[in-house]
Image (cartoon, grey):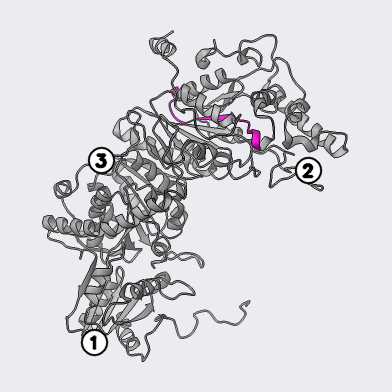
Amino acid sequence: MTGTQELRRRQPRFLGLEPGHRACQGCGQALAAALVTEAAGPDVILVNATGCLEVFTTPWPQSAWRLPWIHSLFENAAAVAAGVEAALKRQGRPSKVLAFAGDGGTFDIGFRSLSGMIERHHEVLFVCFDNEAYMNTGVQRSSSTPHAAATTTSPAGRKLPGKRHLKKDLLAIVTAHHLPYAATATVAYPGDLMAKVRRGMATEGPAFLLVYSPCPLGWVHDPRDMIAVARLAVETGIFPVVEFERGELVSVLPIREKKPVVEFLRLQGRFAHLLGDDPKALEEREHLQALADANIARFGLLARGEDERDTVSAARVRRGGRIR
Amino acid sequence: MRAAFEGSQAIARAVAMCRPEVIAAYPITPQTHIVEALARLVYDGELEAEIVSVESEFSAASVVLGAAAAGARAYTASASQGILLMAEVLYNIAGMRLPLVLTCANRAVSAPINIWNDHQDAMAVRDAGWIQLFCTDNQEAVDTTVQAFRITQRTEIPVMVCVDGFILTHLFEPIDLPSQEEVDRYLPPFTFARRLDPARPLTLGALVGPGHYTEVRAELAADLEAAKAEIVAADRDWADITGRFCGGLMRAQGPHSARLGILTLGSIYGTLQEAVATRPPPEPVRLMALRCLRPFPVEALREACRGLCDLIVLERAIAPGAGGILANEVRAALYGMPDAPRVHGAVCGLGGRDVPLEILPRLIELARAAEPVWSEIVDLQATPPVPMEGRVR
């Protein structure tokens, strides 16, 4: 263990995001943001896109942030972060820059500025809290919403059963920039998430982290099931937890016990119309299962025997979120 | 140092002498020569700045926003569609009270697409909360650029320096460039009290509800009003060093006995000066150029209009369905003034249409109308340049 690592281990937990903010019960994003800032440590500057996180943490004159934090607009977190980074570079200040956005601010409206920031190689760790719809405005579909999920603008209608398009493969687009580091993580595996934040922080150049963050309100599940839903997304293959360096896959979080997709669907009201014996529902279930199986095959997600990083071992969290 | 420079080159050198730390821009005609010149200086190692060549004007404005918030002197330039694409960010920069400077190389707004000069772009964002200064020539563009960095630093209000695209940006003329020593004497190093700093964490850009929003907006409105004094002081202090004064809030020339005035923005002022000098009008005319569109210099304008019977507002922009933009603002500013002149609205020079010296007699004719002219486009061609036959209506 190096001196810095030892020092970090001995430090009390750093809270970048204080409790007492106004997030919903069981908010995946609130937990994820707390874990990310804890891992990133105090010497960072946060740039936050418009969205739930901005709203529930900074109702003037209150702020839940213990870190320097700026919110500008919905679609420019990556560009503002690039500007902050350029200024720090010119001034010779060593602080790291983190950009936070939801899936709307990353996959859709913020996509252009994200691509530009990565292409120009700014030293920014961009973290997308992916809750698969526009939750802040009341659960409208985004390009991250999974196929067949019901949202207020892709409802489970009599003619069309939920969203008719696939979830955008953002990670493939991001990794096509051949950036030094890109990964996915989820709140269900905090140790893995925090380790990836540290990797992103240590990366020279741009890093991207996609954090799967369930939204009880939009996904229509019991707030206490938040972690269970996030874990099932990984165990079914719906959400692959993977790591890329320079566009190459370098590691995955292996699935020790693969679960059927229907177990993941069953917990969430957004997929309620896919349960039951209706032939259309059956077809959609088969489709989603096929998509999950394709993820497992594409990334080689099935564990071969026990692995200290697999879906069972990685769920055991030590204090400080460290994994061995 | 007096020498011939292209306007854009001179502006770029003025920017460089202000020692910007972060420059971000996206190419758009006719702004390109300014940022190309700055990039050359950076790439040749003559200017120590981060140059961020972004993927859109939206990001250009966002990058300088972030840079200013992190405590860096920041600069960008754009025009036309670029200004409109930036519009959301421009409001945001002003609302967050972030100090930075933008050069707007004024250009028409599409459609029809047109790369030539008018003022529609700057007018479209006149209520964004920025200080907007218009330059009548390239000497003023240079001097105003240097002043803009001081004004923004002292007021924490962003400043847009408006220069007529092509007419100024691509014009070679003799310009007195200040020395680096003069600029350093005038402009202190950049500091920003609210800068993002892990040692002193602040929250910038919080959600403000109905309970506080009005107060925040009122403060910006009041501070823009108060910025007039800073704009004049910046001009006077610069004049103390260089001997050149840009007129403070507005320029005016002509005899006090004049009963007819013409008010304009930007380089048309020079055209009118030339017209008056070479084609003496039948009656004395007072020429005026508004240097400062925002904050709107109501008192200075009233003072300059004293004694006038007729005032023609000549502008290169239009509010379709509502007449001239500047004319309407002037009418509002003069409302209630004792013996206020009649205000005539005249629009010309849209999309780069040449404004010839012969416009002067036409304007004087306009002011002789029995009723004040609400809004007239004074340089419409008598016949359409493209035949009407065969057009789908």
**Residue that label 1 marks:** B281
Q: Which residues are magenta?
A: A202-217
Work out which residue is located at the far bottom of the displayed protein and give it: B370
Quadrant hosting residue B21: top left
Residue A89, numbered label: none
Label 1 vs label 2: CA separation?
76 Å
**Residue that label 3 marks:** B191
Q: Disc 1 residue type?
A: Pro
* Chain letter of disc 3 in the image: B
Q: For numbered disc 2, what is the local secondary structure?
A: loop
Report whether B214 appears left or right of B112: left
- For the point 70% across and 11% down, which residue is it? A304
Above or below, comparing residue A322 to residue B361 in the picture: above
Residue B350 on image: x %, y %: 41, 72
**Callout 1 environment at 10 Å: few (<14), some (14 to 19), or many (20+)?**
few
**Residue that label 2 marks:** A161
Q: Is residue B355 visible?
A: no
Q: Disc 3 residue type?
A: Thr
